[in-house]
């Protein structure tokens, strides 16, 4: 016979325990010690995932898997993990005596790092009070990037109560039953609704369904027009547009900052096939919501690709470089310094272009050829005069010294 109250629709596991404690009229520590059958006493428990789910489910008359899927953040956390890993985690969490509660806490961080405080919808609270005689914490309201109620589409109220655990008196409260809902500001509504829909899609995906997210994102990015004329995806441009769409402040709050100077921004990585780097769920949600809200406005995102080989006026460039080269050679001669050709080319700024096609620089070529034969050259073609005399055999010359003997 169940001793804890039966969960309400979408009630998060921590809220079930809070109501149970209230119904039984126990203080937190004796209550948790009893629930978790802890030998040494227990004074805190996770609010969003909870260890000993098998025990809690038996106390509130549910199947363990039902509790895991409908009353914890587990489906959200594992939505983008490989099927085998999801199965392993599920088995582990539903063990009668979980072995490592720390790993559960690490798993919950995927939600908690971007959503540290509890939220509620005033309209839901009022309706719950009327319908059930008490309020409760809804799971959907606690997920990262969510600012509107799933049902009423009005702004949620963020409290200062920690979402992570229940361990103190302040964390025992339920949402206040008589609040008033505000209308959301129109400008932010479209974005907030897109995030709401993407999050709902993640949460409702059956655990065993495998989705090729990368292919989906790539398709949506193409439809949204983030394509180079060559046909490649313009991921840099997409990352930039996403950055401006959400704004740096909102992204930082969700731990989704990015460095636009890098080609490895998280949106670019999510669009890269075969990328195995683990990333937070909220990043998938942000990308999905962004792409879905850009499915109709193609043209503005078509990015002309930079020409790989810009056409240059080589005649003018050769002339300019030759002038620089002459003055550089004059300096080097005056200083009695020996330099390499590579150094000269670098100094006059045409090294790469010259090495890829010296025929485009006839003036410089002529100057450099005579430089290579001169004593100024560090690596002289055919040997410097001094060495030609000293070691004539190296260059196939008859030795004057030998002839002398
Ligand atoms: Zn609501």
Image (cartoon, grey):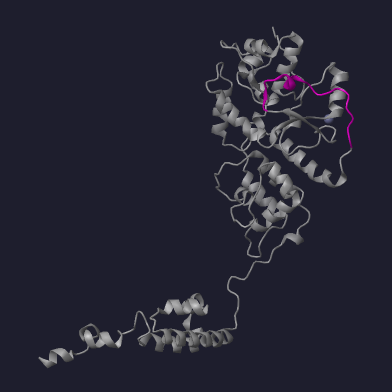
Question: Quick check: 70 left or right of 375?
Answer: right
The answer to whether residue 171 is above or below residue 245 is above
Q: Which quarter shows the C terminus?
A: bottom left
Question: Quick check: 77 left or right of 174?
Answer: left
Q: In the figure, residue 205 lies in which quadrant?
A: top right
Q: Residue at x 56, y 16 (%)?
A: 96
Residue 307 picture location, percent across and down? 62, 71
Residue 374 picture location, percent across and down? 36, 88
Viewer-proximal residue among 233 and 282? 282
Viewer-proximal residue among 370 and 283? 370
Extreme top residue here?
A: 1
**Number of on-image labels:** 0
Extreme left residue here?
A: 405
Q: In the figure, residue 145 lies in which quadrant?
A: top right
Extreme front residue here?
A: 335
The answer to whether residue 258 is above or below residue 161 is below
Residue 160 picture location, percent across and down? 76, 30
Verify whether residue 374 appears in magenta. Answer: no
Q: Which quarter shows the N terminus?
A: top right
In this picture, which residue range is highlighted in magenta? 164-182
The answer to whether residue 277 is above or below residue 85 is below
Residue 31 picture location, percent across and down? 67, 11
Viewer-proximal residue among 90 and 209? 90
Q: Residue at x 40, y 78 (%)?
A: 340
Ligand 1, seen in the image, is in the quarter at: top right
The answer to whether residue 381 is above or below residue 6 is below
Q: Is the stretch drawn in magenta largely helix, strand or loop?
A: loop
Q: Is residue 1 visible?
A: yes
Q: Is residue 291 visible?
A: no
Question: Quick check: 335 left or right of 391?
Answer: right
């Amino acid at each position: 016979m169940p001793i804890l109250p039966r969960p309400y629709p979408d009630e998060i596991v921590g809220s079930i325990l809070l109501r149970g404690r209230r119904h039984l009229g126990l203080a937190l520590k004796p209550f948790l010690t009893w629930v978790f059958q802890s030998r040494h006493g227990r004074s805190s428990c996770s609010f969003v995932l909870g260890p000993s789910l098998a025990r809690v489910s038996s106390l509130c008359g549910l199947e363990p898997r039902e509790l895991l899927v409908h009353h914890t953040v587990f489906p959200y956390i594992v939505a983008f993990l490989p099927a085998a890993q999801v199965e392993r985690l599920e088995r582990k969490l539903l063990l009668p005596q979980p072995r490592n509660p720390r790993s559960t806490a690490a798993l919950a961080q995927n939600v908690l790092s971007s959503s540290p405080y509890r939220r509620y919808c005033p309209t839901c609270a009022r309706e719950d009070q009327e319908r059930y005689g008490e309020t409760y914490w809804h799971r959907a309201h606690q997920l990262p990037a969510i600012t509107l109620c799933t049902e009423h589409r009005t702004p949620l109220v963020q409290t200062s109560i920690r979402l992570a655990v229940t361990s103190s008196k302040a964390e025992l409260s339920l949402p206040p039953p008589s609040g008033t809902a505000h209308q959301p500001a129109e400008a932010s509504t479209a974005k907030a609704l897109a995030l709401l829909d993407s999050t709902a899609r993640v949460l409702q995906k059956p655990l065993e369904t495998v989705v090729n997210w990368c292919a989906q994102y790539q398709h949506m990015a193409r439809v949204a027009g983030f394509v180079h004329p060559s046909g490649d995806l313009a991921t840099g441009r997409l990352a930039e547009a996403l950055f401006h769409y959400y704004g740096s402040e909102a992204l930082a709050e969700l731990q989704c900052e990015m460095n636009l100077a890098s080609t490895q921004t998280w949106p670019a990585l999510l669009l890269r096939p075969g990328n195995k780097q683990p990333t937070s769920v909220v990043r998938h949600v942000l990308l999905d919501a962004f792409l879905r809200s850009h499915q109709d406005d193609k043209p503005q995102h078509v990015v002309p690709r930079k020409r790989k080989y810009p056409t240059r006026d080589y005649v003018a460039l050769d002339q300019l470089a030759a002038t620089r080269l002459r003055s550089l050679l004059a300096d080097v001669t005056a200083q009695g310094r020996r330099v390499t050709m590579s150094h000269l080319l670098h100094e006059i700024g045409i090294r790469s272009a010259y090495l890829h096609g010296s025929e485009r620089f006839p003036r410089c070529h002529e100057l450099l050829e005579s430089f290579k034969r001169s004593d100024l050259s560090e690596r002289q073609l055919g040997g410097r005069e001094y060495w030609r005399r000293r070691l004539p055999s190296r260059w196939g010359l008859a030795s004057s010294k030998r002839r002398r003997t």
